[in-house]
Image (spheres, rainbow, N blue to C red):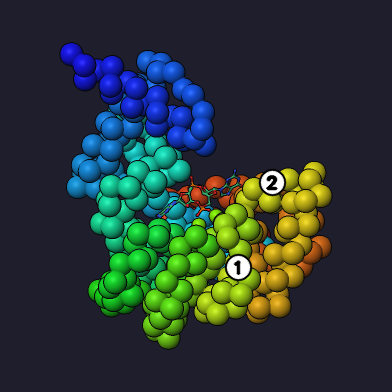
Amino acid sequence: GIEEPLKRADMAMYQAKAAGRNTLRFFDPSMQRVIAERASLEIDLHAALAQGQFTLVYQPQVSIGGNSYGAEALLRWLHPVRGQVSPAEFIPMAEDTGIILPLGQWVLETACAQLAVWAGQPDMAHMSVAVNVSPRQFHQADFADQVLATLQRTGASPLRLKLELTEGMLVSNVEDVIAKMVRLKSAGVGFSLDDFGMGYSSLSYLKRLPLDQLKIDQSFVRDVLIDPNDAAISRMVIVLAESLGLVVVAEGVETAEQRDFLAGQVCRVYQGYLFSRPLPAAGLEQYIRSSLNTRP
Ligand code: C2E
Ligand code: MG
Ligand code: MG
């Protein structure tokens, strides 16, 4: 019939649009494969939550003296056939389909329950946990209520919970964004601005937001020793954060040279493979204990 050729033309058109419009794309079968794979992953995503295929791992945030005061919770999906699927792949999908709402709530609930457990362990009681929040989740009218109810239900201390937001979600509806943040902040919840430097950096709204932390995006950290532009951007972010009274965290620190360069710019908190990969909760406990023992 006529449907198949039309579908193929459609796929080619989407590819052309994705390539920035005003261009040509011919259909090729690999397009169909990519789209079919995406569709089947999307279907699997619906079942994954109910089937308990998600876990959280925790990556320590380390201060200049080698102490960890917190960890970032990162989502992992172990697909029964494909194995580990990267959040970079499934988070955008979960956003598009709306699954991010129950999934994001599961992440919050699991991280808060973990915080409550750690509060009872002397070595871990000081640790805070940072949870990534996606735009669609944050923009729900009752987002602040959900967070407060989750804290209550799990018994986690709001003082130990940090929410990581991204720049893009803070630029529209600024008044509403600020109202939600202020409400949570007054309950003790902290805020971190993730991937800083990648989005629209309107510096005027930045000072209106009740933030605690800025995270320098790892793309700048990666080439900080090689690319003078990245070095300049990371220096700018550090100075900016300092003058706004915010803590700067450098993400994706992989080498001692990167850490030393950042330390020279007076960035005091790091996260990255140099210190540790993201670990299951028990692995993080072990990491924290062994770093306590080796401290001079
Ligand atoms: P992000 O929040 O910026 O998280 C940092 C990412 O950098 C993580 O990737 C982490 O594993 C990775 N990373 C940490 N240290 C290093 C390093 O030294 N080198 C390199 N190359 N990478 C490093 P991951 O876990 O794959 O997560 C990717 C993104 O997916 C996150 O970026 C975040 O935007 C999103 N994400 C992860 N978990 C959640 C979640 O629970 N909810 C939401 N909404 N998004 C999440
Ligand atoms: Mg993050
Ligand atoms: Mg980041």
What is the x, y in percent for residue 216? Answer: 64, 59
Which quadrant of the figure contains the C terminus? bottom right
What is the x, y in percent for residue 17? Answer: 45, 34
Mark 2 CB near ligand 1 (8 Å cut): yes
The count of marks equals 2
Q: Which numbered circle lies on residue 202?
A: 1
Q: Are marks 2 and 1 in contact (CB under 8 Å)?
A: no
| Residue 113 position by quadrant | bottom left
Please state if 38 lies on the left or on the right of 259 as rendered: left
Residue situated in front as seen by the camera: 56 or 176: 176
Residue at screen point 52% across, 36% down:
20
What is the x, y in percent for residue 221? Answer: 69, 51
Q: Which numbered circle lies on residue 175?
A: none
Residue at screen point 79% across, 64% down:
265
The residue tagged 2 is 222
Residue at screen point 70% across, 75% down:
242
Please state if 64 lies on the left or on the right of 25 as rendered: right
| Residue 181 position by quadrant | bottom left
Q: Look at label 2 and name its amino acid.
A: Arg
Please state if 6 lies on the left or on the right of 91 as rendered: left
| Residue 231 position by quadrant | bottom right
Residue situated in front as seen by the camera: 8 or 155: 8
- The residue at the far bottom in this view is 186
What is the x, y in percent for residue 236? Answer: 74, 64
Marks 2 and 1, Cα distance to the nearest angstrom? 24 Å
Q: Quadrant of ligand 3?
A: bottom right
- Residue 105 visible in the snapshot: yes
- Residue 154 visible in the snapshot: no
How busy is the neighbourhood of tag 1: few (under 14 within 10 Å), some, or many (20 plus)? few
Residue at screen point 50% across, 50% down:
278
If you read the primary sequence from the N terminus, does the residue marked by circle 2 or circle 1 appear first? 1
Assign a secondary structure to mark 2.
Answer: helix
